[in-house]
Image: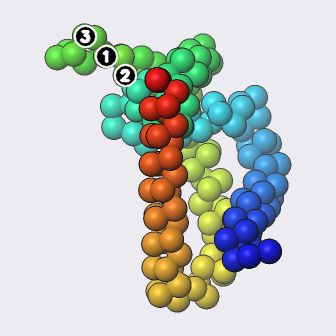
Amino acid sequence: MNKEEEIMSSVRDVFNKMASLNKSKMEVSLKGYKSSEVHGVEYIGKMTDPNVTKLAEAFYMTRGAISKLTKKLIEKDLIESYQKADNKKEIYFRLTTKGQKVFDIHEALHKEFRDRDKAVFEQVTEEQFNATLKFLKNYSNHLDTEIQKQNADDKS
């Protein structure tokens, strides 16, 4: 296995272990909600003026898929839609009281997971953090470019 394959394999392995370790606690604490619904609540809770287009970009999903998701979130009373006085064309979303509770539970769980893993990060030097972050940013930018190319190809 070359270094590129080793890195990709390691990233997948770490991601899968985190997902496996966190899954049961998430499912118990957020029973009745699908992962996509919880993450929809998370994004809406963190974004400024979230709308279908912004959510589609953040999730790397189509606007149609986001419309379906937001419809489910509205039906479950987790979000509500609204319009701004100066822009009656665009529809935005915000959390309801029930949605804010889901958001708060999700955030508390993520803090708990970060606290659990803190010992590992305390051993990382500033140089290691910087090198890792630089690599991840470069790779993410590369993937963004490839997604844009694919989207352009799909439209033509």
Q: Amino acid at mark 2?
A: Tyr
Q: Is residue 92 above or below residue 102?
A: above
Q: In which quadrant will I find the N terminus?
A: bottom right
Q: Where residue 57 appears, x then y in whole percent?
A: 45, 36
> Which is nearer the eye, 149 or 100?
149
91 with respect to 96 (left or right): left
As drawn, the label of residue 88 is 3
As drawn, the label of residue 65 is none
Q: Secondary structure at mark 3?
A: strand
| Residue at the image position 76 percent from the left and 54 percent from the top | 19
Q: Amino acid at mark 3?
A: Lys
CB under 8 Å between discs 1 and 2: yes
| Residue at the image position 25 percent from the left and 10 percent from the top | 88
CB under 8 Å between discs 3 and 1: yes
| Residue at the image position 47 percent from the left and 48 percent from the top | 144
As drawn, the label of residue 92 is 2
Spatial CA span between label 2 and label 3: 10 Å
